[in-house]
Amino acid sequence: MSASAQGGISDPGLITLVNKLQDVFTTVGVQNPIDLPQIVVVGSQSSGKSSVLENIVGRDFLPRGTGIVTRRPLVLQLINRAPGGGGKPNGVKEEVSTAGDKEANIDEWGEFLHIPGQKFYDFNKIRDEIVKETEAKTGRNSGISPAPINLRIYSPNVLTLTLVDLPGLTKVPVGDQPRDIERQIREMVLKQISKPNAIILAVTGANTDLANSDGLKLAREVDPEGQRTIGVLTKVDLMDDGTDVVDILAGRIIPLRLGYVPVVNRGQRDIDNKKAITAALENEKNFFENHKAYRNKSSYCGTPYLARKLNLILMMHIKQTLPDIKARISASLQKYTTELSGLGDSMLGNSANIVLNIITEFTNEWRTVLEGNNTELSSVELSGGARISFVFHELYSNGVKAVDPFDQVKDVDIRTILYNSSGSSPALFVGTTAFELIVKQQIKRLEDPSLKCVSLVYDELVRILTQLLGKQFFRRYPQLKEKFHAVVINFFKKVMDPTNKLVKDLVSMEACYINTGHPDFLNGHRAMAIVNEKHNPAKPVQVDPKTGKPLPASATPQRAASPVLDVMSDQNGGFFGSFFAGRNKKKMAAMEAPPPSLKASGTLSEREGVEVEVIKLLINSYYSIVKKTLIDMVPKAVMLNLVQFTKDEMQRELLENMYRTDSLEELLKESDYTIRRRKECQQMVESLSRASEIVSQVQ
């Protein structure tokens, strides 16, 4: 083991390297993105954590007292250095006073990262500085803070080592401690020990049941197999007579791959009496060498062995994780460099040129998205011009096709219109007036879905605008983004009026002139033939049995007259017949005046039924023609007046409303987020670059 320890002393480079990395990430004041190897010390308040650390250092320097003394993580970097290699005698005289540290010497000192360049030879002043810096973050009450204090101790009496001391685990808040102090400490400890590169140093009093150890219990949560946990058993000298920790050391109770190390610390009376740590270490050595349970393995007990073991474990751990650390530093550096590049320089140059370039780039992107030439085409969802196409060919087309002319106009209404359109003389034939009246009414219904189509395309243009303004560049200039949004939205609204008018005119054109001469229109003769065919199915042609030739029409048995021609049939079943139906025949002679409101009632006569069917056939035929026309023409109108117009005129509109403004400088005022994030990224790139240089020195 001693050879390994010597190796640890002679090759402190790896641990020093990690110390440098810790310093790099701490000084820039941003969160460390790299999980560095370190030994994290956990244990309950009464477990003796502070005494273990002081014994490893060989000096008194940690705050003492009741309750939570360690209220911020203390990153303790121990640096082994040969005696006589530095320090100024004058500095020692200045630091040491009669009430100061009697053991102060030129070869041992501490440095805090928050006070660079200042050496503390008086370790009592190190304790005072820890208290002062703790209270600076947490106040004088018993609150805690996750912000670490970095302390580096140079000494010929330490092995190069990095330890992180955390607040002791507690169960019940006392005094002015926060009510949720247990949860706060637990979360802080878990955050530190859950990092895969953390070695957990679980400190437990040997005079308590190991199964109740708070430190081991928490370590098992993140390291259930005990792969990266080392146990320290304190207060071995306080165990009852006849009891020892041999079974624990042998791994028979709670096995840990890194094992356990028993130590003997100073008791509270020794601390109060200011017993020197050198004397305490000598006392510890004598205890293990003379105890019947430990004397055979005393070389594996005590604080010096613990320090050597930790030094070796940390160094081996760093060797294993170094390739991954290098890769993480490289990946993080690339990520933050890319983000910093995206944020751009704080000063870009002439504001007028900048705005002009932005307008040009935005206009090009606008055209690109609408035309579908975007290089960032999605395979997951439709975007840009494809969504507008969907509005035209799916939503609008299906919306128009779904309009049924007869869901509002019933057969009885058609009959009423037929009678009204013939005036005082009953019509001999189906009149075109009724047909045109109904068709025009129904064509007007297509105006709503057509205007809705315009509105949906407008929404899609706004959606594209939002996507383009959501880019990182516009987050950088919030006022410019706001101005862009306002100008473009006003532009859209301005072109919506002529677009809506054109669409309305298209519908009005269709309703204004009913082109019954359209080649696809089912004319009246054809409609009447279809209805007649339906009511009077064709009978087989009569053949003369003698000659075998078809008999002339006059020779065939006479069929019933066509209902269409049978004007006088079912006189009492028509409109007026149905009105008088059910009235007392005796009162007919009274010739009562018609009621103020005269409505159709009763069922349609056969003749009326035929007329209604003819009208419906004609309406259906012409309505289908109109639908096809609008499905074709309305998208063209929207494209002409809205989509294509914005593509052609967007740049001119932006230049008119933005480029000539006197507030270009104001528009290019960066957001607080951009300024803050650029600073963070610059700091991170700087620290990661330095970290990359540090790790590149190790092959």
Image (cartoon, helix red, strand yellow):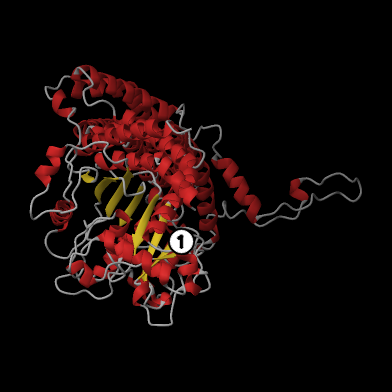
Res 261 visible: yes
Res 403 visible: no
Relative placement, left or right, of 376 versus 42 is: right
- Of all residues shown, which one is farthest toward the right? 546
Image quarter of residue 62: bottom left
| Type of amino acid at the residue the image marks with label 1 | Ser
Q: Residue at the location (22% across, 43% down)?
A: 113
Along the line of sight, which residue is nearer the eye, 281 or 229? 281
Relative placement, left or right, of 692 versus 146 is: right
- Of all residues shown, which one is farthest toward the bottom? 241
Relative placement, left or right, of 12 versus 257 is: left
Image quarter of residue 20: top left
- Helix, strand or loop status at disc 1: helix
Q: Residue at the location (69% across, 56% down)?
A: 559
Image quarter of residue 215: bottom left
- Quickly name the residue at label 1: 299
Q: Residue at the location (27% across, 67% down)?
A: 266
Residue 660 at what x, y percent from top left? Answer: 16, 19
Along the line of sight, which residue is nearer the eye, 99 or 485? 99
80 up-or-down from 660: above or below: below
Within 10 Å of the Cα at label 1, are there few (<14), some (14-19), or many (20+) other Cα atoms? some
Along the line of sight, which residue is nearer the eye, 563 or 234? 234
635 up-or-down from 257: above or below: above
Residue 644 at what x, y percent from top left? Answer: 37, 25
Relative placement, left or right, of 99 versus 519 is: left
